[in-house]
Image (tube, coloured by chain):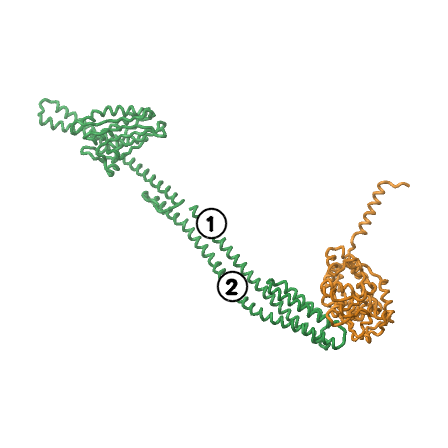
Chain colours: A green, B orange
Amino acid sequence: MKRRIIIGLACFTLIFFLGGIYIINAIQKTTSTLNDLIKLHQVEILREQLLSDAKLTLSDFAFQNTRYASKSDTVVANVVHMAGVAKRCSTCHHSAETTGKIAELRTRIQSYEEALSRVLTVRASPSRLIYEEDGAFRAGRELINQLDSMTLLTRSRLEKKTASSLKRIGEMKSLLFILIAAGPVFAVGLAVIFIQGFTKPLNEILRATRKVKNGDLEFRIQGLRDEFGEVAASFNEMAKSLNEHMQNLQRAEQMKVVGEIAAGLVHEIKNPLTGIKASMQVLLEQESCEEEDRVVLSKVLDAVMGIEGLMKSLLNFAKPPKPRLVPVDMNMVLESTVAFSLPYASVGPNGPRDVIVVKDFDPHLPSTLADPGQMQQVFLNLFMNALEAMPGGGTLTVRTSAEPGGGLRIEIRDTGKGIDRNAREKLFVPFFTTKHKGTGLGLAVTKRFVEAHGGTISADENPAGGTIFRILLPPAGPR
Amino acid sequence: MGVRPTQVVFIVFVLGIAVLAAGARADTRLPEGTRRPFTIGLTPEQNVFKQMERYAPLAEYLSEKTGLDVRLKVFMSYGKVIDDFVSSGVDGAFFGSLAYVLARERTGVRVLVRPEDRNGSSLYHGLVFVRKGSGIRHVTEMRGKRFAFVDPASTAGFLLPLIYLRSHGVKDYKGYFAETYFAGTHEDAIYDVLNGKADIGAAKNTIFWRLAGADPRISRELKILTRSPDMPETALAVRKDLDHQVGTAIRDTLLQMHNDPLGLTILRDLGARRFVLTTEAYYEPVVGYLRQIGCSPKNYRYPGE
């Protein structure tokens, strides 16, 4: 999101910067065009002023020696003004052709000035005076004719130039209006996109929060990206963790209830069972007991002992005894448990079998705090399950290794028939079993014992066939 | 009685201050609130419009330095400057030497300053010239020709040629020549001869050579027959009743303007180095020349009037 904001702001700034440059450029061009136009009109005004001055001086000249004659000061002022205008004209033009024309015009004005001055100052015979006056008048007419032709020529050019300049200015004006109008629209559009970019993910997160608040711990936020995506991932992890905690709490609550029920049941059932068991043993020990009855009594006794075992397992699961932690060398515990299990390895349900036991113990395995009895029961359960999974023989591998943080890893893998994925997921659920005679409490109790030690247990598929159980125990230390 | 060292130091200090004060430029600006018009008349030494253009920077400079509103007025003849001096309301004018002598007699103007050229001369002389190849080498060869004078009140353009003609026995110049006329300006007199409108011309040397600098035909095609003795250059004179303070401000500004970079530039454009004081004594020869033609400043009448 931060990147998107930066990119968005950069785009926004760039577009406005470019827009600003374009507007400044357009204004400058328009100003320049107007300036050129004003200059051209100023030139035209100067030319017309020059023409007017020339006509005025010629008029002064024509009316001299009449009662309409202007004062000599006025005549001089008019001529000086005309010369000044011509001088200004020459500063306006730059092209060689125009400069040449202006120079020619100034020469003509100078000739006219000289002729006028001559007429105004000369004292001579009438014929000479007439000659001088004719010369001055001719110079004046020639000047006016030249100015007339120049004015006519440039006026049409100026009109065309003015029309084209005004058209260009109009186009620039329209473009500027469009830009000025488009600017706020663009800004609003960008603002909407940004606001949506903020509010949409926030609304999604808010909705998820409300769902979780209302108890839907399975709800997960989907489809968010960037920083909001990270927040969503954290939220989802939190929801998952909360869900697990809730489930654990529920399970603990259930276990507590089950434990109390089991304890009550065991207490209620144990005494009658003890009586039944004792009575059955007494009856079996009597010599008068018939062989048929003895078989029946033995089966009853087995059943009673089975119920006793089930009760014990149920009690262990529902109300496991608190582990008595002592420093333990786990390799030693495993060694003794393997030794205890070996007799069962060589004989399977269908007769003798060949089970190879591989012990891959880490000699540098650190000692840990554990209840050796409970851990022995854990390993025994797992060995027995492994052996049961290999009725025709196989390899039982027991491996220990130290974990980086000081913890322990214990792996027990068999090469049996394996457990399918669905069954593996429910393997530690109480009363779930794949065996015909199983109670479904063995692995559940195993898990309870491991968890009571602060560890975890998991089951995976063995790549070589069979199943791998992995136990991770925390490092020795205050628990 | 001995002089103590401290007294010597004090005397030197006071003398130093006095010298510095004397050397410092006087402030020529009139007091505030006295901005009034001051009109300077110009004689048509050359093209009247050029005259206005030529003197305009000087007028602006005087306005700035004195606080006066200095204006220019060009007259269409030398005689007009003299005759209309009072009625036209001018406060001063640049007069040629003859024009000044006549104006002094008739209006009481008093001369202040005149320019000194780049060579340090504040004098000019008159020239009489013809076209080369005209065959005119002497006054005797002028008979029946056309003579272009400048103005009846011009020293170099009329009085001096008249003396020259008289000295060669020509008393009645009008009868001697086929045509005489007044070209109005020195410039026109020169160009009339150059362009064949007249056979003989008279003008002052300063204008002749200034024009020759710009137009090589003048040196190439004209021949100077004679030159007159030196005369004082065109000078600024003011009316007799001019406020003394104003006259002093104008005079001092002109006398000091060569010390100012801007003033120096304006002087250069006028073809001058500086303005110098002029006195009535410079004009005594003019009175002598008038006397030679049987006139005095008082009874001199412009021919053709």
Please give left or right for residue A56 compared with residue A433 in the image.
right
Question: Neighbour class for label 1 at 10 Å: few (<14), some, many (≥20)?
Answer: few
**Residue at figure coordinates x 56%, y 60% from the top left:** A32
Q: Nearer the viewer, residue B19 or A185?
A: B19
Q: Quadrant of residue A144?
A: bottom right
Q: Could you tell me how far apart the alpha carbons at marks 2 and 1 are, in whole angstroms?
A: 33 Å
Q: Nearer the viewer, residue A26 or A85?
A: A85
- What is the x, y in percent for residue A316? 25, 30
Picture layout, residue A443 above or below residue A228? above
Helix, strand or loop for disc 1 = helix
Question: Neighbour class for label 2 at 10 Å: few (<14), some, many (≥20)?
Answer: some
Q: Which residue is mark 1?
A: A10
Q: Amino acid at mark 2?
A: Arg
Picture layout, residue A112 above or below residue B1? below
Picture layout, residue A188 above or below residue B157? above
Please give left or right for residue A460 compared with residue A51 in the image.
left
Residue A267 in sight here: no
- What is the x, y in percent for residue B216? 72, 64
Q: Write down the chain letter for disc 2.
A: A
Q: Quadrant of residue A87?
A: bottom right
Q: Nearer the viewer, residue B196 or A362?
A: B196
- What is the x, y in percent for residue A79? 69, 69
Q: Amino acid at mark 1?
A: Ala
Numbered disc in front, either 2 or 1: 2
User: Which numbered disc covers residue A168?
Assistant: 2
